[in-house]
Image (spheres, grey):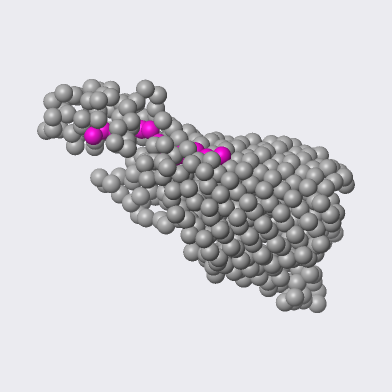
Amino acid sequence: MKKYIFILGLCLCTSAANVFAQEKTEAQQELDAYMADGIVKFKSKDNNFSFRVGGRVAMDGAYYFDDFTDRGSGAKFQAARIRLFSQIGKAFDIKLDFDLASSSVIKDAYLRWHTNKNGFLKVGNYAEPFSAENIQSSMDYSFINKSATVEALGTGRALGVSYRYYHPYFWVEGGLFSQKLATEYNQGDMGYSASARILGRMTNDDWNFHIGGSVNYRRPNANGFTNGSDDFNRSVVYASGLESSIDQTKFLSATVNNVKSVFKYGIEGMANFRNIYVKGEYIYSRNNRERDWEYNFQSSLGSLLSTMFPTMEAYQKFMGADTPACFSGYTVEAGVLIFGGNYSYNRVDALMNRPKGKTLELVLRYNHTDLNDIVDGNIFYNGAFYTSSLHASFGLKDQSIAGGKADTFTVGLNYYVTDNIVTRLNYSYQKVDNQYNLPMSLDKNLHSIQARVAFEF
């Protein structure tokens, strides 16, 4: 069996070498242009090896107009990255991206193998293929911060492997992922996920359009061992600072315990005509829960509760069935280039390209994020939800989650000084509904002004 696998691998490598001896893919041509534009770069005489060393710096400032909770205005380095790109042979390239301003130092660290003229295999640490906004670089995204929906419900980066195929009329990427380097891992089984983004599209010199969606299935990391098992203690935290780059107060926050699995899906559409673009996204997250019924029932024996519900069946009926916790959000945004040229569409990444230098851009965004999942007909008492007064007397909370919800309106003005220097100014207004989160229930209307200067080389 090993012999056949080796022969198959050798044939694939030989085939790839033959293809790329003739022509380079669109993704490789894109990287060639980036490499040629570098300041610190090297290329071998036979053109089989090259590398470029670069960096990115982003400096943010923010002033907050508070309602009740005090937020800290100020400034900081949002990014201070060192990056290495390298082309190895005719079909391979790598990217290493380290951020010295972040607690998660490793951003992108991956290898790409260009298997044919429209596709590549990718392995390493990078953004899972889910949602256009989720995967777009912060340098290229038209707003200073990602929306509250993507901050809370997006997938972010993870260690994994995926395959991308980009065709003029459709685009697809799917992969398997495991460790999230930005998330602390405890004992027990590490989580894993499967993600895919699928689009249909039409592209033209003057206009571009795509529509499609994403799916994600994840088994969260275990939280160590509880009662000798790591199956029932998995938790997921969804939170958002409401598009804030300096202050990290989480006005929306939902913690879901006893999570067995998470299923997410997203729908997206994007279009542009010359100097105007529009985009819309919707994300839904379903968290399937399962309690350790055997342990919970055994723990109740000998208590007053066990005299009222002495059997497993009676105990489960009183406590209520495990139900999923569901959250959602959506974003609509639009932009216009006041002067400087037109928008262009990146067919490799299925995203809008960053505008060129000497361009002024006006952008608008509306976002709605809902992290509430409250069981109908329950009782809210002393900061918690209960199925009945009897449950409340025992202190047995139901499965309701009150993470809050918010509507955010953002207007931004961006000036692209050169192709590699960007200035951004954002004003945001948030209408917050945190009526069940007592510490923040008095925060209703939030305002902020934020600015960014970013450059890369």
Which residue lies at the image location 75% right of the left edge and 46% below the top edge? 335
Front-lying residue, 178 or 73? 73
Magenta segment: 395-407
Q: Is residue 165 above or below residue 386?
A: below
**Corner quadrant of residue 17:** bottom right
Name the side, left or right, on which 162 lies relative to 24: left
| Relative image position of residue 53 (x, y in whole percent) | 68, 73
Name the side, left or right, on which 21 lies relative to 287: right
Q: In this view, does 32 lie above or below 391?
A: below
Mark count:
0
**Corner quadrant of residue 305:** top left
Which residue lies at the image location 68% right of the left edge and 58% below the top edge? 424
Quarter the C terminus occupies = bottom right
Front-lying residue, 222 or 81? 81
| Relative image position of residue 375 (x, y in whole percent) | 39, 27
Residue 449 seen anywhere in this rendered image of the structure: yes
Is residue 402 inside the magenta stretch? Answer: yes
Can you name the residue that lies furthest to the right here?
205
